[in-house]
Amino acid sequence: MQRLFLGVSPTEQQVNQLSDIQSLLTTVGHKGYGRPVNRNNFHMTIAFLGQTDNASLALLIKAIDAIACTSGWKKFSITLDKLTLWRKPQVLCLSAPSLTQVSLNPELYYTVEHCQKIIHSIQSKSVPSRSTYNGAEQPTKPHLHFTPHITLLRKAKLLPEKNLIQMGLAAITLNPSQMHLYRSVSGERGVEYHILHSWPLV
């Protein structure tokens, strides 16, 4: 079994920007904001699979390949401009407004919804067909609620009183060219995210 998720990565310049935000929040006078995430783990999750066996992994790759070879996975752009605290998981993120309807960001909505549909189909043991994703059939999930975000700190309990602009920091706009399948691996150095497979966004 492998713990898997689909997502996209920031550029190296954006990784540096995210690290700068972490550094500012963890300096003296900002204690309580949490433990910084390893910069090598920065990513924006598209869809989470959780513990996955090899048979389900093979089905996942086959289904995502099917879209890549027909309609293609849509390239999207998303701006993360707000520091957000999720109190229950104690996570401080850089986020965008929640994606609740397709008109807010059609390309990203398409990607998230189709990934979630594939995962749901595999986990319910109903393998999606190629026709489901080439326009013959439309996704049937009744509602999508997705908040684009990159986690900055864990074990966080406080939300900064100032926004990014007031802190002298810039928003980050992701324009990824690939979607990745990540594996979460726990080791002596903590959790690491390894890319197992990638697909172009076109």
Image: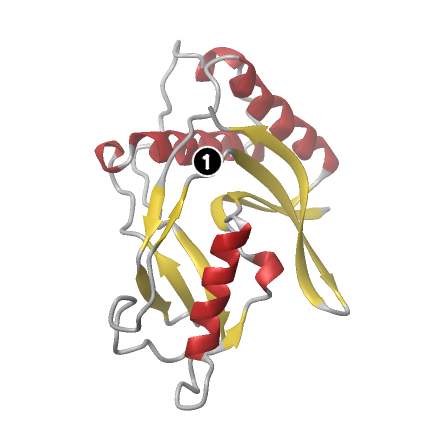
Element assignment for label 1: helix
* Mark 1 lies on residue: 116
Q: Is residue 60 left or right of residue 13?
A: right
- Looking at this view, name the residue that lies furthest to the bottom: 29
Q: Is any part of residue 164 visible from this angle?
A: yes
- Say which of 156 and 11 sits in front: 11
Does 91 sit above or below residue 43? below
Figure check: 12 above or below 57: below
- Whether residue 173 sits left or right of residue 123 in the image: it is left
Please tell me which residue is depicted at 54% across the width and 56% down the height of the picture. Answer: 42
Q: Residue at x 74, y 36 (%)?
A: 54
Of 171 and 196, the residue lying toward us: 171
* x and y, in percent, of residue 100 in the image: 26, 42
- Which quadrant of the structure image shows residue 62? top right
Q: Do we see residue 156 in this rendering?
A: no
Q: Residue at x 50, y 71 (%)?
A: 154
| Residue 129: percent from left, percent from top | 53, 15
Residue 147 vertical placement versus 118 (above, below): below
Give, as a three-letter code, the residue at label 1. Answer: Gln
Q: Residues within 10 Å of mark 1 (few under 14, many from 20)?
A: many
What percent of the width, then of the height, locates residue 60? 61, 30
**Above or below for 193 versus 26:** above
Q: Depth check: give the residue in front, 93 or 116.
A: 93
Q: Position of residue 147 (x, y in %)?
A: 35, 50
